[in-house]
Structure formats: C-alpha cells, structure tokens
Image (cartoon, helix red, strand yellow):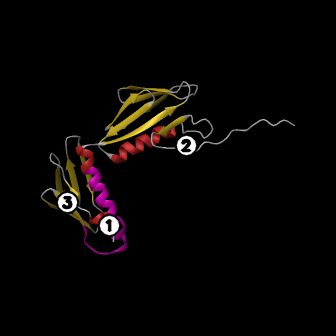
C-alpha cells in the first residue's frame, strides 16, 4: 500500500478546490490548475483537507494512487506559493538577459540563442543565476530542463548551464608525455 497516497492534503487559506466527478480544479492567488483523475481513484474534501482513496483494488489503482495524491498536492502548493527552479551559467563570455517572455543567451555559439518561456513561467537573472518560477511544477521543471539542454555542462572545465544544486563530475584532461 502506498504510504504517500494515504497522507491527507491540507488546503491553505485562500485556495479553493472544486470537485466534479473525476475532475479537480484548484484556484489560488497564483492561478488555476485542473486535473482529471485516473479511473479507480476517488478524492473527497472534508473542510480544509483532501483525501485520496482507491475505489477498487487493482494493480493499476495501486500504481497510480500515490501519483494522483502527489499531483493534487502539487496543484495546491503551486497555486498558493508556486515553484522555482534555479540554473547557473558557467563559462567565459556566457551570459543571459530577460526580454519580456524570452531569454537571450550567449553560450559560445556563433549566434545568440533565444529561449521562449512557456506561458505561466517567469524568469529572473541575477549575475549568472537564472531563476524560473511559476505555479505549475511540471511546466517549470520542463522549461528548466529545456534551458539546460541548450548547453549541458561539460566534464573538463564545467562550462555550460547546470542546476544550482547539481554537482558536475570533473575529469582530468590529457597530459603531455615526454618520451
């Protein structure tokens, strides 16, 4: 049995949850998110707590039980406080600037790279750190992954775009031999 699925979800003040059949709609100060529940999973609201239950015991519901609870919890957290993801740019001459909903990047290519932010994601740049924020965890995480994929960090000098908490395993370069 899923230990995550059994945990109740606490709904903070200022967040409203609407349940209609298999559809969950969460509204808060940061925005609105919607989700359709998988078959065999039910959700019930009791005051300011939500509980996810299984309608039937099948392997499919067992697998998706904790997932549905986590997705609904992420929706509640997202519309109340939001999510952030920070990336760091390392390299000589590597820089970034925000212009509206785009990020202009100089990554050592012969041309500048323009990265268009998805709707609902905002970017701030301080020195060499790009901070993406939004109310949908999946969209923020995917935008950060797409931004990192533009220039992945290389293992010799560590140049490229990496997550702030990511550690790059460094390799020793070749050394000249006398012989």
Mark 3 residue element: strand
Residue in the picture at 61% in, 35% down: 157
Residue in the picture at 34% in, 60% down: 67
Q: Is residue 130 left or right of residue 30?
A: right
How far apart are labels 2 and 1 at the CA level?
A: 33 Å
Task: Read off the magenta span.
Answer: 53-75
Q: Which residue is mark 2?
A: 168
In this rendering, the answer to whether 7 lies above or below 74 is below
x and y, in percent, of residue 102 in the image: 40, 29
Q: Which mark is residue 50?
A: 3
x and y, in percent, of residue 147 in the image: 46, 38
Q: Which mark is residue 3?
A: 1
In this rendering, the answer to whether 90 lies above or below 43 is above
How far apart are labels 3 and 1 at the CA level?
A: 15 Å
Residue in the picture at 48% in, 43% down: 166
Outermost residue, front side? 178
């Amino acid at each position: 049995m899923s230990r995550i699925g059994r945990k109740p979800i606490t709904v903070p003040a200022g967040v409203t949850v609407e349940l209609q059949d298999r559809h969950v709609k969460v509204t808060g100060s940061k925005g609105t998110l919607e989700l359709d529940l998988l078959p065999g999973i039910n959700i019930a609201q009791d005051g300011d707590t939500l509980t996810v239950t299984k309608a039937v015991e099948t392997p499919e519901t067992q697998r998706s039980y904790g997932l549905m609870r986590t997705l609904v919890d992420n929706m509640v957290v997202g519309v109340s406080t939001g999510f952030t993801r920070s990336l760091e740019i390392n390299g000589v001459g590597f820089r970034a600037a925000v212009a509206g909903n785009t990020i202009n990047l100089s990554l050592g290519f012969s041309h500048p790279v323009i990265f268009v932010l998805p709707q609902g994601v905002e970017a701030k740049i301080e020195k060499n750190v790009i901070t993406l924020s939004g109310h949908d965890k999946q969209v923020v995480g995917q935008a950060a992954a797409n931004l990192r994929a533009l220039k992945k960090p290389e293992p010799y000098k560590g140049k490229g775009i990496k997550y702030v908490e990511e550690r790059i395993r460094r390799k020793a370069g070749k050394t000249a031999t006398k012989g």
